[in-house]
Amino acid sequence: MNADLKEFSIEANRLALIIAPDLKSQSSEQIAQGLASRLSEASDSYAESRRLNENLRKAAIQLSEAKESIKTATASLKRLLDIAGVDSNELLAGAIKRSDEYRRLNGEVAATNINLLNGGDGLTRQQIEAEIDAADLVQLVSELETINIQLSETVNKQTELSAQLSTAAKILSDIGGSDAATQAEAQRQEALSAMSDVAERFVKVFTAQRLLRWAIDRYREEKQGPLLARASTIFSILTSGSFQKLIVDYEREPMDLEGQRSDGKLVGISGLSDGTRDQLYLALRLAALEMHLDQTMPLPFIADDLFINYDDERSKAGFEALRALSEQTQVIFLSHHDHLIPTVETVFGKQVNIVYL
């Protein structure tokens, strides 16, 4: 045992000289304990080093992905910068703000023009402006207010006379055959006469009001705006004549858009089938796009499997509408349905360019 202890002491001192010279002057037990402690610390440090290296590797991957994202975003921004004609993100933000404001103002102008033409009895804007200049608007408003006041007064007077008549009838019943019967009868006759005058006046005012309402309704019915008129034509084409036109119900709050069938029946949006509702939205979009193309530089119209829920007949009608749009701008139709190609060739003829991808 002493020999083993001596050999252990020699080996401990040898290791101390190699690994930890600062421990060579200590006993073999202290050297062993010190080396064991340092081994444990070195193992912990190695594990921590591996953990940190793994985190560093993940961070490097995230950094690479972030750089790629930045590169992609920069490429997208460069395209926007080129379109806007600016050379910095700050100027681009200002251009975007001005573009949004421009679209908002254009929308307000378009809405105003549509409202003007919807209430224009089918007249053009120039004709409406000429009629407005020639009409005495102040007098028309004044007459309408006077009619409303007279109608209200007539109704109040009728209510008042009805109460008087009821009172007179009660008095007549109470007095029976007394001497006051003659006076009560005279009062009754006066009340009846007054009621007759008021009723005649009420009929005149009420008739005038109904005539005015009829004229307004007829005005709206016959003279709808160009957007609605064009959308009606496209909708009739898309539905193969199942619907004749689109009508706006101005009496509802909010106003309601309805389709009129060939038999005159009106069908609201909620009553349309999914396919017909898609055709309605397409008609409105194409009509708005045609009006927009009349006022700005035309850009290509791209449609991706627009008629996926259409049968052959409706698909042909849809391509007819797109052919009309192609007279104003380029139409690009993407589809993976080969059976539509004969229909496209029939509708567009030699003008169509079919590309297989």
Image (tube, rainbow, N blue to C red):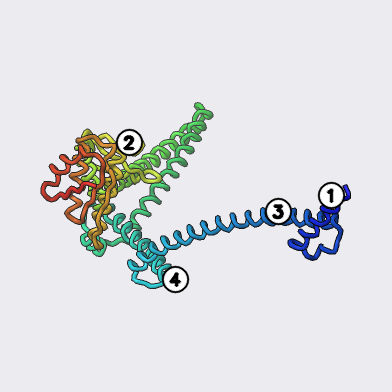
> Residue at horizontal 19%, vertical 40%?
316
Mark 4 nearby-residue class (10 Å; few <14, some 14–19, many ≥20): few
User: Residues at badges 2 and 3 in contact (C-beta under 8 Å)?
Assistant: no
**Which of these two is toward me, 280 or 116?**
280
Residue 274 is labelled as 2
Q: Which residue is mark 4?
A: 90
Instruction: Residue 9 in the image: state x and y as whole percent.
Output: 83, 55
The three-letter amino acid code for the residue at tag 2 is Asp
Residue 125's spot in the image, x, y percent?
A: 23, 60
- Mark number, residue 150: none
Check disc 1 and give the amino acid type.
Asp
Is tag 3's residue or tag 4's residue first in the polypeptide sequence? 3
Q: CA distance from mark 2 to mark 4?
A: 45 Å
Residue 27 placed where, x, y %?
Answer: 86, 58
Work out whether residue 188 can be spotted: yes
Q: Nearer the viewer, mark 3 or mark 4?
A: 3
* Badge 4 amino acid: Glu
What is the distance, in whole Å, between disc 3 and disc 4 at their CAs?
53 Å
The residue that label 1 is drawn on is: 4
Dot 2 alpha-carbon crowd within 10 angstroms: few under 14, some 14 to 19, many 20 or more: few
